[in-house]
Image: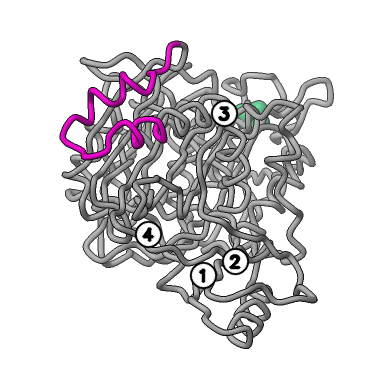
């Protein structure tokens, strides 16, 4: 989800009457330096742990402010600097509003998370969180919230603050809104000292588009693998192939998981599974969906598997995919055979041809050099992750794959591929099974050779190669080019 930096989140809160610490935003060096004492905070979307990274500084003199502003404004992806007044804080609270997918006790809606101990290190104090579930259609009033906070002194002011925060969250259809800390001042008033929000791009209404607009970055911070996936998409635009590497390192002791999530359902299930867990670290975000070919699934998978720190691959969709799961399983099998650093996998297939997909993986998994566990769609990712420890590895296997030489029968431009015929594996010179199994009739047997039918189209399903290798003699193989960054 895109993240809104603090200076933009403040505008949303202000519009709903949430009191904020006084602050001024600078996106260029000002002519007049503001009065001391201030905290200077770099505004970088998605940046966390800012204090530890030197992106928040206390400045007491005009020289310090001038130097801090100049340095922070030159940070990569910095949209500006917020100069916030220093205030005397009597007490700090933590509060967040999140979307809640519901459970056995609560319907889907929103949830307020509140802790009487705000400030840094809240991640380690999740036990102290009070949860107040609410309906998005019928949000709680301040007095409803106050009843849930009966142990907190001055709770009417706090309840009023949280009600306004909830109204901001619902009003702008946010997915996350966090205020940390909420400062209680000497006079008992409550103000937001720091805040951030996350949102879903498609949920932003036209009238609010400007508020959520993030300035175009002039710096291309794409990783080499992200550029590889961009190139794969450019060469084969049909269907979604999305990949973004995490900019953070896996915490010590966690399992580093490379993810191939198929569609919004797969992503949602994975986020619900891993949200709040620090023992599982997602190395990347991903989405393969929208009718992409098996060729493209293979290429994206190879890029995902090339992440050097990965210990295991997880692949899951919603469990009801239209994407043919047998074609996807063929892509997984090919990627595991041909990658120089194949990953152990937890694979969940659900949707069209799921039984064939599961059967294929069961057939081939014993011959693969890595552990594979395959799951039916009834098993959700929260149960799958119980198996992470059984398959994840600290020592990636290295293997060498060289495509077998043969005759290039023909090439396909879209989706791009080279089809290689191995006549020595078809000594009788009879039509191989893979030709009959091509679902579109694109393959044909003519003059004792495999060739293509110009009246039909190749959909890049990989069925011909899978059938040839499993049920034939390997008469036909497919070569799918990849850039050298892919291992
Ligand atoms: S030739 Fe036929 S079976 Fe082979 S990938 Fe193309 S559509 Fe699929």
Q: Residue furthest right?
A: 454
Location of residue 6 in the rendering, given as x and y in whole percent from the top left corner = 56, 53
Q: CA distance from mark 2 to mark 3?
A: 67 Å
Q: Nearer the viewer, residue 359 or 37?
A: 37
Q: CA distance from mark 1 to mark 4?
A: 38 Å
Location of residue 352 in the rendering, given as x and y in whole percent from the top left corner = 48, 16
In the rendered image, residue 378 lying in the magenta stretch gets the answer no
Q: CA distance from mark 4 to mark 3?
A: 35 Å
Q: CA distance from mark 1 to mark 2?
A: 6 Å
**Residue that label 4 marks:** 310
Label ID, residue 434: 3
Kind of element beneath mark 1: strand
Ligand 1 within 8 Å of disc 3? The answer is yes
**Residue that label 1 marks:** 39
Label ID, residue 368: none
Q: Earlier in the sequence, mark 1 or mark 2?
A: 1
Residues packed near mark 4 inside 10 Å, few (<14), some (14 to 19) or many (20 plus): many
- Main secondary structure of the magenta stretch: helix
Closer to viewer: mark 2 or mark 3: 2
Q: Earlier in the sequence, mark 4 or mark 3?
A: 4
Q: CA distance from mark 2 to mark 4?
A: 40 Å
Q: Quadrant of residue 31?
A: bottom right
Kind of element beneath mark 3: helix
**Residue that label 2 marks:** 83
Q: Nearer the viewer, residue 229 or 218?
A: 218
* Circle count: 4
Q: Earlier in the sequence, mark 1 or mark 3?
A: 1
- Residue range (magenta): 138-162
Kind of element beneath mark 4: loop
Q: Dividing the image into four quarters, tell me where ligand 1 lies.
A: top right
């Amino acid at each position: 989800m895109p993240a809104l930096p603090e200076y933009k989140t403040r505008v949303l809160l202000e519009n709903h009457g949430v009191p904020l610490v006084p602050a001024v935003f600078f996106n260029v060096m000002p002519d007049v330096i503001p009065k001391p004492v201030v905290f200077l905070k770099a505004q970088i979307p998605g940046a966390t742990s800012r204090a530890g990274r030197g992106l928040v500084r206390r400045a007491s003199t005009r020289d310090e402010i001038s130097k801090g502003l100049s340095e922070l404004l030159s940070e990569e992806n910095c949209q500006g600097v917020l100069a916030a007044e220093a205030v005397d804080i009597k007490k700090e609270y933590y509060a967040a509003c999140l979307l809640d997918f519901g459970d056995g006790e609560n319907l889907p809606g929103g949830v307020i998370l509140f802790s009487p101990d705000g400030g840094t290190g809240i991640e380690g104090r999740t036990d102290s969180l009070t949860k107040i579930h609410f309906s998005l259609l019928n949000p709680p009033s301040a007095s409803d919230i106050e009843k849930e906070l009966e142990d907190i002194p001055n709770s009417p002011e706090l309840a009023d603050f949280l009600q306004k925060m909830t109204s901001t969250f619902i009003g702008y259809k946010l997915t996350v809104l966090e205020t940390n800390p909420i400062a209680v001042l000497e006079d008992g008033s409550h103000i937001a000292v720091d805040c951030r929000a996350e949102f879903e791009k498609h949920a932003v209404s036209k009238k609010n588009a400007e508020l959520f607009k993030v300035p175009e970055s002039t710096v291309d911070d794409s990783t080499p693998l992200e550029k590889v996936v961009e190139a794969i998409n450019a060469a084969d635009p049909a269907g979604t192939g999305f990949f973004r590497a995490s900019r953070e390192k896996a915490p010590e002791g966690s399992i580093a998981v490379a993810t191939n999530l198929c569609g919004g359902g797969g992503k949602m299930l994975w986020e619900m599974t891993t949200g709040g867990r620090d023992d599982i670290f997602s190395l990347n975000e991903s989405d393969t969906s929208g009718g992409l070919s098996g060729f493209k699934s293979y290429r994206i998978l190879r890029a995902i598997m090339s992440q050097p720190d990965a210990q295991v691959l997880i692949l899951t969709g919603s469990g009801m995919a239209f994407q043919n799961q047998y074609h996807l399983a063929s892509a997984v099998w090919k990627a595991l055979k041909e990658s120089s650093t194949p990953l152990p996998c937890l694979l969940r297939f659900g949707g069209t041809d799921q039984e064939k997909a599961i059967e294929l993986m069961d057939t081939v998994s014993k011959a693969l050099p890595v552990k594979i566990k395959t799951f039916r769609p009834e098993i959700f990712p929260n149960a799958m992750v119980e198996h992470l420890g059984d398959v994840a590895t600290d020592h990636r296997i290295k293997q060498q794959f060289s495509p077998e030489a043969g005759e290039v029968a023909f090439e396909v431009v879209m989706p791009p591929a080279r089809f290689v015929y191995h006549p020595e594996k078809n000594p009788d010179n009879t039509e191989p099974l893979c030709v009959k199994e091509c679902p579109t009739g694109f393959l044909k047997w003519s003059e004792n050779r495999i060739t293509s039918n110009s009246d039909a189209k190749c959909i890049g399903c990989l069925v011909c190669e899978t059938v040839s290798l499993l049920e034939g003699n390997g008469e036909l193989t497919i070569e799918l080019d990849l850039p050298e960054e892919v291992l």
